[in-house]
Image (cartoon, rainbow, N blue to C red):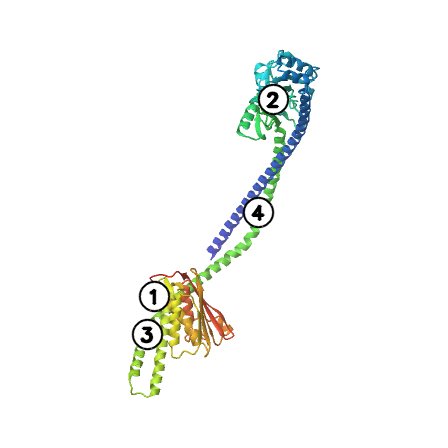
Amino acid sequence: MSSAAKGTKGGMATYRTQLLLGMMLVVSALTALGLYLAQRNVTADAERYLQQNFRSELTALNKLQELRRAALAQRCGELVSKPRIHAALEDNALDLLYPSARDELRDLMEGEEPSPEKAASSLHARFYRFLDSAGAVLPPPNPKDVGELSKESEARLTLQKLPDTQQIGYLLENAGGGETVDETMAVPIFSSETGELISALVVGFKPFELAGERGSIGTRTGIWVDGQLYSSSLPRDAAAEISDETTNAVTRSDHAQSNFRIRVNGEPHLLFYKRLNPGSLFPAAYEIFVYPLTDYAARLHRLRWKIGGAGGLFLLVGFVASHFISARLSVPVEKLVVDSEENRARRRRAEAALASTSEELKRSTRYSADASHQLKSPVTVLRAGIETLLAREDFKPEVYEELSGLLHQTHRLTGVIDDLLLLSRLDVGRLQIESDSVNLSQLVEEWLDDLGALPDSPEVKIEKKIPPELCVVGERRYTSLIVQNLLENARKYNRPGGRIRVAAHGHASAVVLTVGNTGDPIARPAQEHIFERFHHTSTASGHGLGLNLARELARLHGGDLKLVCSENDWTEFELRLRGSQPSANRADKLG
């Protein structure tokens, strides 16, 4: 007893340790999940805040850019409508084109060069060129008057065709050992006589975006065109690195704008690019915004440390609470262990009793089957003796009547013995059926004919509504036994002048047969026990086996038998069996 108690105490100590470890693991998992979600939310909020600030400044810059472009478009539109320029183009006096344009575009080209701070916002042009009807550049006689360009840069102003609307482009040029970029605007020129497109004026300006480092968030800008990035605010090596990343991003994506993270000189940055001239005949150009994320990463790192500290404190509190909770929870478990031992002992006793009961049931089933077999022989001998006596002719009439009654009882006794034997086989699961297609309509007709031929059959009216060739799945002799029990009960417990109603309907999946009869109804308390063995009522089988046997056979066939109603001079049963398609070679047709 002491060793068992020690084993129980040792098991409880192990249980308390496991419970404590389990609770600590749960607390650790919840803390880790909480830390992960908190850090993810903080990161998402910070990222969203950064994007909002970034895009708000970009929106303000874009509005200023749109206002400047509108002013440029208006100014260039006024220039191309000058009469002297139209006269030179329409009269094909191209040698007078640039001299005439020099006087008309004097205000745009001459004057003081604006300071670098104001160059991007001014309307001072750096060069202009005219295009012929094929979109090629008309060379000026004196490039100094119209703004000097290298031959390569001037060739990049050529378009595949003359534009019928204003076009925006960007021209990257190496000049004086450095790089410059110009924003070009191509304005179409239409004939004042025919309205046909005859030329275009291309004017170059200092881009608005190249104002250096702008905004409170430290954004640096540049323009990417022809695979190269120009930025006055970025170091040359950083610009080259960003240019390669931008080229890859633009090549892989067809979006007009997007953003991604890059590392420049080992520091994290956010790069945003936007198409400057969508739909233009000039090569695609993108405005680049680069924002350093060093301060953002530092703030995010501090927030993560704060969250981690709070998580560690929560974890420590959780571990302490786990210790106290596990100690409290182990108390009822100890009682549960003791109760469990008692329950196991009771279960072992119950299993032993169940095994004994099962063995007794098997012996009872074997006894019932053996008794049925033993009773059949003397009953057969008794019936044969009574039949022999009935064959004699020297008895009084009342003796023959008594012998006929005894012969009838032997037939009933044979039926009881057969039912007992069949139920015994059902109980032990040894009754097997051979499923076939059975003509239920034919079976009902045959038994109705037999009922009418019985000498003691009361005068009853038979109503039937059964479609021909209604077939079920089962074995003919057992299906016939079910129908026999239902119809014999309907006849036996009917009243003189009553009626029997037999109806059936169904399809390939299920067939329903209802048998109803007039007569005394079954008492309501007895209706719950109508299918029990050896239960006697005024409307049940005389030996209390018929309905029980019929229902067991119906269930063996995959169906069921139930009492639908029994009241007001009417009792009705419902038989449900699996339906079957008629077979051309059925054995029941041969019988």
CB within 8 Å, label 2 to label 3: no
Residue at left offset 62%, top offset 31%:
296
Label 1: how many Cα within 10 Å (few below 14, some 14–19, many 20+):
few
What residue is shown with label 2?
170
Query: In 3D space, how far apart are the residues under numbered discs 4 and 3 (Cα atoms)?
Result: 76 Å
> SS class of the residue under badge 4?
helix
Query: In 3D space, how far apart are the residues under numbered discs 1 and 3 (Cα atoms)?
Result: 31 Å
Q: Earlier in the sequence, mark 1 or mark 2?
A: 2
Instruction: Indicate left or right for 178 with 371 as reference.
Output: right
Q: Amino acid at mark 2?
A: Tyr
Label 2: how many Cα within 10 Å (few below 14, some 14–19, many 20+):
many
Q: Viewer-proximal residue, 154 or 231? A: 154
Q: Earlier in the sequence, mark 1 or mark 3?
A: 3
Query: In 3D space, how far apart are the residues under numbered discs 1 and 4 (Cα atoms)?
Result: 80 Å
> SS class of the residue under badge 3?
helix
Q: Amino acid at mark 1?
A: Lys
* Foreground label between 1 and 4: 1
> SS class of the residue under badge 1?
helix
- 528 up-or-down from 161: above or below: below
CB within 8 Å, label 1 to label 3: no
What residue is shown with label 4?
322
What residue is shown with label 3?
376
Label 4: how many Cα within 10 Å (few below 14, some 14–19, many 20+):
many
